[in-house]
Image (spheres, rainbow, N blue to C red):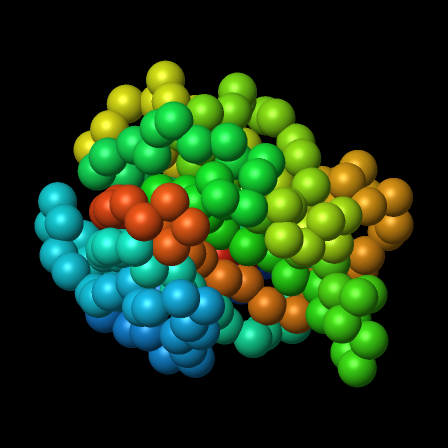
Amino acid sequence: MKRFILLMMMLITALNVAAEVTLPIGEFSRNRLNGWEQKSFTGETRYQLQMVDGVVVVRADSHAAGSGLFKEQTVDLEKTPFLNWSWRIGNRLTGLNEQSKAGDDYAARVYAIVKGGLTFWQTKTINYVWSGNSAKFSVWANAFAGNQVMMLALRDSEAPLNVWHTEKRNVRADLQKLFGEDFRSIDAVALMTDTDNSRGQASAFYGDIWFSKD
């Protein structure tokens, strides 16, 4: 009887683990930046692993610079459509027209990227941004890339500073809504803190990033 109960407990545990399907993208809390590369547009935002509140995260400091960290990794959105992460910012970027090229700066943003192969214009990207001026859940086309890159404000000027916020987005559903296509996978994830267009300054922190089934 005891053996039967033990076997049942093991089975339940295995089923629970199987149900919690996850795909790690950024394992910063394990002091890792494996597979992440820096891409510079103007100058270089400084990215470094740092212990904050007892957990290792990525700290970003931008001074009139625009560069990001990106990781090429195929994600099967049929298996793990939900993108999860936490972030916080140290200051706001205010007084910018975020829908203009001069104001296309954000204290924090996370990208989900579908590559177009050799045809660059077929690349599609969602920018989940911490907006300084647009209302929460506002959507607009990027000032530089047009409808290839759609901006979605998850946090706005009312979100408190220096406080961790946790996000969970159904990327497959967001891609369908914003581009009208059912993408079954993405090819890369990126994060960026940038102030190159406004010549300003911003700091932000990014926690672990992963995809999940639910």
Viewer-nearest residue: 41 or 129: 41
Tally of numbered tags: 0
Viewer-nearest residue: 78 or 133: 133
Horizontal arrangement in the rendering, residue 73 relative to residue 203 (left or right):
right
Viewer-nearest residue: 196 or 28: 196
Relative to 23, is 178 above or below? above
Quarter of the image where one finds residue 169: top right
Quarter of the image where one finds residue 196: bottom left
Relative to 7, is 141 above or below? above
Horizontal arrangement in the rendering, residue 150 relative to residue 22 (left or right):
right
Rendering coords of residue 178 (x, y %): 77, 40
Viewer-nearest residue: 138 or 162: 138
Relative to 116, is 155 above or below? above
Rendering coords of residue 20 (x, y %): 55, 51
Horizontal arrangement in the rendering, residue 142 relative to residue 58 (left or right):
right
- Write the residue at 36% across / 17% down: 158
Q: In the displayed orientation, state which residue is furthest to the right.
A: 181
Please say whether residue 95 is visible from this viewpoint.
yes
Rendering coords of residue 32 (x, y %): 29, 73
- Write the residue at 28% across / 45% down: 200
